[in-house]
Image: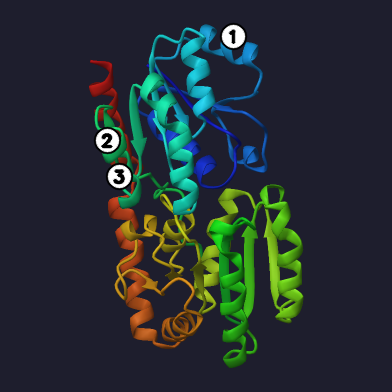
């Protein structure tokens, strides 16, 4: 059976998801290919998976006709879903949503998607995130829906031991755009530095995908908060190296800070936990599958900097609680989010939609 996974560009969580699930399904005998509309920095992470990069309709049509896919999974791009059906694709088209940003943005997009989903989607696929599940079940009750967790490469991606740093590090992973809420991370770091002067902030992003309207504000904020000498920004780190960085952050006595307003799944949080790097996060919904407060991580209320600082200090200074959280988080990810579990659920979906 041949499956094509599509997205706009190979970057961030979608690049991770497509690469991990393709490899896992290929190990079970499926032939998986990837199609991206435009190239991206994350393409260098892809090895051993046939990958197309084109937004040209004629090229897409030739690919679909020559490869003769059984299933095409189209993530977010409603126009591509429509195009492949109008090109005569006779297999099953699954429309996938992994995250749509803030609530207002998401509802606007669902309004745009509505007619296209009803006309062209054979099934819907999304992670176990309450806001997505609620919206899709309410809006599209007649379309077959499949809701299960995304996978992590628990066998090959995980903790790596390095000599510990002499200073604590607070990490952040995302894009310089509104929903990732980078400004809150900077404010938390600013307040924490008052009590921990040797603190470093490490930011990981894809600079090619930053919101141009926020770049100047970001640079202004860094200068205004006097963080320039303590903030290191890493852009487009190869995915396999992120396990090293996350492990170093955890061993420094620091943590990963997730400030997102809304998340569909939240790969950064799950991967940090897998690398024994504790996490402080907003309740962005998607992270609920990972974090139980004071058990596998910590929450703070969006916008409450004082609370975030208090939770940060507890996470850094209460060694007993910190170690319990680190161990419980790693175990939770390994036991609940393996590629084996994902493949079982994906194969069940395939069986149902191909009947």
Residue assigned mark 1 = 62
Query: For the residue labelled by badge 2, is the local secondary structure a helix, a strand or a loop?
Result: helix
Q: Position of residue 46 (x, y in %)?
A: 58, 36
Tell us which disc is closer to us: 1 or 3: 3
Q: Residues within 10 Å of mark 2 (few under 14, many from 20)?
A: some
Q: Position of residue 9 (x, y in %)?
A: 61, 36
Residue assigned mark 3 = 133
Q: Is residue 140 above or below residue 2?
A: below
Q: Residues within 10 Å of mark 1 (few under 14, many from 20)?
A: few
Q: Is residue 52 left or right of residue 258?
A: right
Q: Is residue 276 left or right of residue 51?
A: left
Q: Is residue 152 above or below residue 118?
A: below
**Closer to us: 193 or 100:** 100
Residue assigned mark 2 = 345
Q: Quadrant of residue 175 in the image? A: bottom right
What's the distance in space between the residues labelled 2 and 1, CA to CA?
A: 31 Å
């Amino acid at each position: 059976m041949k499956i094509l996974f599509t997205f706009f560009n190979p970057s961030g969580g979608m690049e991770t998801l497509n690469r991990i699930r393709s490899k896992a399904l290929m190990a079970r005998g499926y032939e998986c290919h990837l199609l991206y509309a435009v190239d991206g920095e994350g393409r260098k992470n892809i090895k051993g998976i046939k990958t197309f990069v084109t937004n040209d309709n004629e090229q897409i049509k030739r690919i679909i006709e020559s490869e003769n896919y059984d299933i095409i999974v189209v993530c977010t791009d409603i126009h591509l879903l429509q195009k492949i059906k109008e090109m005569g694709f006779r297999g099953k088209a699954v429309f996938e949503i992994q995250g749509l940003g803030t609530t207002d943005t998401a509802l606007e997009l669902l309004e745009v998607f509505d007619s296209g989903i009803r006309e062209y989607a054979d099934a819907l696929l999304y992670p176990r995130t309450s806001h997505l599940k609620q919206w899709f079940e309410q809006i599209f009750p007649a379309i077959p829906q499949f809701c299960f967790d995304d996978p992590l490469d628990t066998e090959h991606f995980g903790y790596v031991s390095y000599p510990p740093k002499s200073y604590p590090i607070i990490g952040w992973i995302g894009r310089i755009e509104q929903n990732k809420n980078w400004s809150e991370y900077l404010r938390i770091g600013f307040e924490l530095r008052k009590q921990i002067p040797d603190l470093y902030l490490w930011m990981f992003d894809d600079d090619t995908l930053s919101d141009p309207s926020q770049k100047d504000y970001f640079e202004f904020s860094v200068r205004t908060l006097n963080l320039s000498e303590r903030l290191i920004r890493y852009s487009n780190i190869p995915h396999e190296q992120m396990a090293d960085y996350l492990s170093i952050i955890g061993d420094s006595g620091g943590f990963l800070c997730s400030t997102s307003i809304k998340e569909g799944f939240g790969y950064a949080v799950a991967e940090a936990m897998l690398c024994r790097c504790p996490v402080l996060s907003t309740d962005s919904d998607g992270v609920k599958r990972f974090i139980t407060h004071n058990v596998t991580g910590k929450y703070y209320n969006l916008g409450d900097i004082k609370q975030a600082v208090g939770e940060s200090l507890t996470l850094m200074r209460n060694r007993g609680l910190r170690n319990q959280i680190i161990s419980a988080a790693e175990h939770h990810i390994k036991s609940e989010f393996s590629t084996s579990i994902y493949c079982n659920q994906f194969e069940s979906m395939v069986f149902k939609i191909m009947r």
